[in-house]
Amino acid sequence: MEEKDQNQKRQEVRARLRYIKSLPILPPIASMLNKMVEDEEMTAVRLGAVIEKDQVLTSKLLKMVNSSFFGFPQRISTVSNAIVLLGFSVIKTLIVTSSIFDMMQSSDVGLWEHSLGCATVAGILARRRAIKNPEEVSTAGLIHDLGKVVIRAEFTKEYNEIQGMVETRRLSMMEAELECIGVAHPEIGGWLIKQWNLPDRLILPVLYHHNPEGSPEFRELSAIVHFSDILIRAIGFGSGGDLWVPPLDHQAWERIKMGKGEVKDLLNELDERIIELQDFTIQMQQTKVK
């Protein structure tokens, strides 16, 4: 594809994202949250009380917060406690993406599991590296492939073409996306969550999870999500949409390089968490059936 044609396609895709219709709409509470947190006197208890008026959303939120990819040792029973432990940006992300995760569970369980797995690895790595607010890194891992959901929902014809290219020509999803629509899922996901006014600590690891050294900031966080994506693909938990394990960026690896003992410990912890993730996925599926 010529550069001029590719740029034109990118602009067309970006324009369509401004009027996206196929994805579930944001919960009404999401638009209220931005205004509420601007109040300097707002407390976690007051904010939690507002969110808890929506019982369905509260149930979803607490299930996510208590899932193994965050890895809290104690059970979190109230939204206000979740806000204190996770921070507003993580809570807001879980709220605005809750309907999209419902759709993933219904239409692409493999991608849902892959996203959970990536979030789990990212959280383990962030804690081992003493990253401030490791739950944000987990959340970035959770939403790193959001662009794939957008393509499937909003660009149905192109998505089918991309799937055909992946199956018949053995291309990676990114290669097929770039050839078909001129833009790949990391950029689409980054554009979308930027529209939701989420912080750069979440946007940039999504936008650069295949090219962490290209990120203008938060390269270590981007490197963690990059490696987590690769590791969970290599293990085979869930599906990223193609058969390939993405190549490891060597500069990114230098940022998070671990010794053999550290890697072994990481894999041992991950083995336990994956069993918990499988149980969590089954529970969420049963909830959807009901």
Image: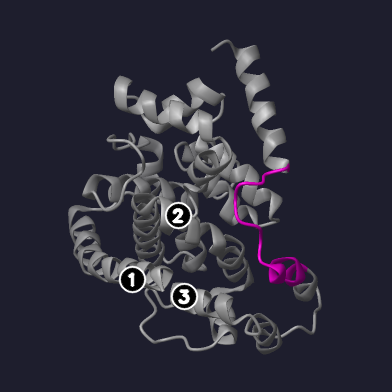
Magenta residue check for 55: no
Label 2 to label 3: alpha-carbon separation? 18 Å
> Badge 1: how crowded within 10 Å, few (<14), some, or many (20+)?
many
Q: Toward the viewer: 149 or 269?
A: 149
Residue placed at 37% from the left, 36% from the top?
A: 249
Label 2, on which residue? 104
Mark sitting earlier along the chain (1/3) = 3
Looking at the rendered image, the quarter that the C terminus falls into is bottom left
The spot of residue 164 in percent (x, y) is 37, 26
* Front disc: 1 or 3: 1
Q: Are marks 1 and 3 in contact (CB under 8 Å)?
A: no
Residue at the extreme front of the image, as rendered = 290
Amino acid on which the number 3 mark rests in the picture:
Val
Amino acid on which the number 1 mark rests in the picture:
Phe
Residue placed at 63% from the left, 80% from the top?
A: 54
Looking at the rendered image, the quarter that the N terminus falls into is top right
Q: Is residue 275 above or below residue 157?
A: below
Mark sitting earlier along the chain (1/2) = 2
Label disc, if present, on residue 65 of the rendered structure: 3
The spot of residue 50 in percent (x, y) is 70, 83
The spot of residue 75 in percent (x, y) is 41, 86
What span is colored magenta in the figure?
Answer: 19-34
Label 1, on which residue? 280
Magenta residue check for 26: yes
Is 215 displayed left or right of 276 in the figure? right
